[in-house]
Amino acid sequence: MLPEMAEATYAGHVGNDGSAIAWGQQLGARLADLGAYQGHGSWAVPQGALISWALMVEGGVQINDQGQRFHDETQGYSEAAVHVLAQPGGVAWNVFDDALLAFAQDFPDFVAAQDAGAVQHAGDSVALAQLIGCPPDALQATLSMVQPGTDPATGRAFKRPLQAPFHAIKVTGALFHTQGGLDIDARTRVLRQDGTPLPNVLAAGGAARGVSGQEVWGYLSGNGLLSAIAGGHIAAHTAQQLLKDTP
């Protein structure tokens, strides 16, 4: 159901194995929003560590092995996974400068990845091109476009240029969890193919459809927790009412 993520690294919980969907299908349940998921375009390789997207939002860029940027990095880390995986080899480099490196020290996950050797350093754009393995002139042209204002190619707005020395992390796109699942009504009752509820089957959280719609770009931070906490709360009240109504 997610062909664009077929080669993505899975970085989610091992318990997310699709059992709820298999059980629901055996009961004749309807499925919904199976095209939605949480991806992440900043999974460090080979360290296997998540790199905070705050680096991109605050001014960092992603560059492929041709020395080019390829999307607006502020549009969201979930859909960024698709953009990164579409690059040669399914990888890109997060590039940032000293100011952003200092900013990142406030994130424990980043510090751990840094200690594991994920962060590489380059004194200038030529050294950075050698690290990435891209043409120096192409990379210099890309970096020269990182200026205050709106980049005409991607539509991204920059506040300042990146200053040498540079720092870079090799990353790929990762899949964390899907956002679709068993179709439910407002009381979290699982629905049959005809839209009527099964008499005593409830679903919430990762087992049920969420609030992200049908595509990767519908995911916002916290959508999974929202479905789990709010859905679980509603399901508990529904279960209580079902028990009261049972002769």
Image (tube, rainbow, N blue to C red):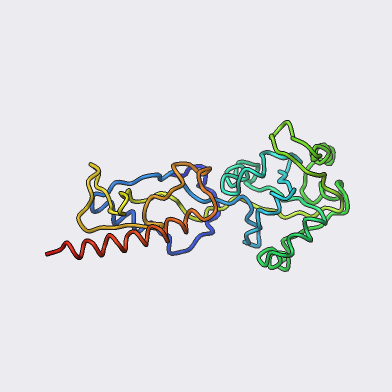
Residue in view at x 25 percent, y 65 percent: 240
Residue in view at x 60 percent, y 49 percent: 77
Residue in view at x 51 percent, y 51 percent: 38
Q: Quadrant of residue 107?
A: bottom right
Given the current orientation, which residue lies at the most extreme left position?
247
Tell how many labels.
0
- Please state if 19 lies on the left or on the right of 135 as rendered: left
Q: Quadrant of residue 147?
A: top right
Q: Position of residue 160 (x, y in %)?
A: 81, 44
- Foreground: 166 or 9? 166
Please state, as top left, top right, bottom left or bottom right, where the N terminus lies in the image. top left
Q: Position of residue 203 (x, y in %)?
A: 32, 57
- Foreground: 222 or 123? 222
- Foreground: 160 or 244? 244
- Please state if 220 lies on the left or on the right of 1 as rendered: right
Q: Position of residue 81 (x, y in %)?
A: 59, 47
